Image (cartoon, rainbow, N blue to C red):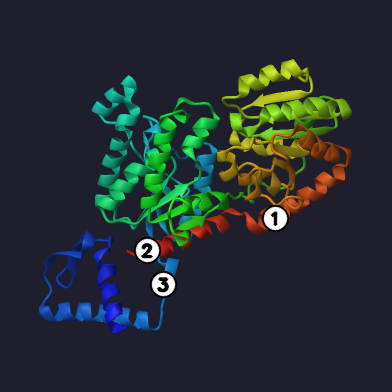
Amino acid sequence: MCLAAIKDFIKYQAFDQKAQTKSTDNSFLFISKAKLISVKSDPVSICCHFGGIIIRHIIEKIFQIDHGSKKPVRVLHVMDQSLPHIAGYTIRAKYLLEDQVARGHEVFVLTGPKQGPDAVDQKIGGVKYLRTHFNRWEKGIASLKGKHIVFGRAIKRRLRKLIKTGGFDIIHAHTPFTIALPALKIAHNFTLPFVYEKRNLWEESARCRGKLSGRWPLYQLSKYIDRWVTRRADSVITITENLRQHTIKMGLAPEKVVVVGNGADTKAFVPREPDPNLRARCLQGGSFIIGYIGTFFKFEGLPLLLETFALLVKRHPGVRLVLVGDGEDRKNIEVLCRELGVGGKCLLVGKVLHEKIIDYYSIMDVLVYPRYRSTLTEMISPLKPLEPMAMAKVVVLSDVGGVRDLVENNESGLFFEAGSKNSLMEVLSRLVAQPDKALYFGEKAYKYVHEKRQWRDMAGKYEEAYEKIQSKF
């Protein structure tokens, strides 16, 4: 037991990244991997110093004393974008990272060049945001459509400088793999634990949206690189259980993959009375509002919602549809509205300020998330449904895998068969005919989010991942 404890102590010291940068007459100066740079203490002090540490470590080993995740860590997140940009990607990070700060950790974020040439280092919510910019040579290459040639180079250059001076304990990279790949290489160069958080499948998203990068051979290349990074990570965090199982099939040990799902800000999104003027404007003489708030991606299934609404309004003339947001499918939706003849009863609001979203949630009777079934939507869950649920609104969702991981059917929400107008029509018609049902399921949704989907509950699972990998370094 004593021998094992001493071995563990040596291993622990060998990977101690918290280098001491000052030395006094009675201390040591160390750098990464415990290389002794200078010793100014006398031999007796040296023996007492090491002897005390080894004895303490033996006691901890014998009595199984575990400091666990209570020990604050200095973590550097590497992300594509961050606040002040507003998107699902940045909002999720905001809540999870600010919770880490509340737990006593020192949290830094390094963003890639996509954050913009004018982005500045800043502190928001206790999180220190640092930026990566192309140098003069890289700007020239990027201007010639060679951004991807120098993208990783710029991130590695900035990371290398930060790690040399920052004394970080963990490098935590987020999708896409174009961010994670350079972060992995630098983390391994400095023998630092590397966490890869997979909240999206970049190549599958590109394929669903019809982008060039979703076609052969770029699609296959993207899958290969993502798999390469995933298999070399010390720990992988996924957004759903389905994605976790997919990751394990790549060859990772189950204990290395942790699910950190989406959550809701229950302090910001609270039940409230609808804005009477806004509701009257959106109702346009009707009596029941069906809504959607989010990005108009092609895989979100908004054409299916429109086609179903065109049938529903014939049976229930008082129904109105309000779509809030913008995106690549916007023009297609506008054309479809005209073709279906529902322009007078369907309101396309466009993009609104983040703080105004709550006003629109408040006036809606039901919110619909009609995602099409695909490899992407089977494994990735949306963020938006949890917001109206926290406001006691009923949500209707297609039964794709990423949604089933997020909501409990007939409990916290209602499912319909993905891609089926008849199935969606049946669920919506029942809610329109029985508004009390919408209130009933809204109350259950509120309870579910407060009990199981608050951001602090999600962020606590970061501790599990960090604790596991720190015990190995």
- Where is residue 346 shown, x and y percent of the image? 75, 24
Instruction: Determine which residue is flagged by label 3.
Output: 67
Instruction: Determine which residue is flagged by label 2.
Output: 470
- Where is residue 280 shown, x and y percent of the image? 80, 29
Res. 193 visible in picture: yes
* Residue 147, above or below 23: above
Q: Which residue is depicted at the point 60% across and 29% down?
A: 298
Q: Nearer the viewer, mark 3 or mark 2?
A: 2
Would residue 410 appear left or right of 227 to someone viewing this image? Answer: right
Question: Tag 2 or tag 3, which sits nearer the N-term?
Answer: 3
- Where is residue 289 shown, x and y percent of the image? 79, 33
Distance, label 3 to label 1, CA atoms, is 32 Å
Question: Tag 1 or tag 3, which sits nearer the N-term?
Answer: 3
* Residue 75, above or below 333: below
Q: Which residue is depicted at the point 27% across and 63% down?
A: 15
Question: Tag 2 or tag 1, which sits nearer the N-term?
Answer: 1
Would residue 260 appear left or right of 473 to someone viewing this image? Answer: right
Would residue 83 appear left or right of 286 to someone viewing this image? Answer: left
Q: Which residue is depicted at the point 50% across and 45% down?
A: 199
Instruction: Determine which residue is flagged by label 1.
Output: 448
Give amino acid for label 1. Tyr
Circle 2: is it few (<14), some (14-19), or many (20+) Cα within 10 Å?
some
Give whichever of 7, 156 is nearer the camera.
Answer: 7
Give amino acid for label 2. Gln
The image quadrant of residue 374 is top right
Distance, label 3 to label 2, CA atoms, is 11 Å
Give amino acid for label 3. His
Circle 3: is it few (<14), some (14-19), or many (20+) Cα within 10 Å?
few
- Quarter holding the N terminus is bottom left
Distance, label 1 to label 2, CA atoms, is 33 Å
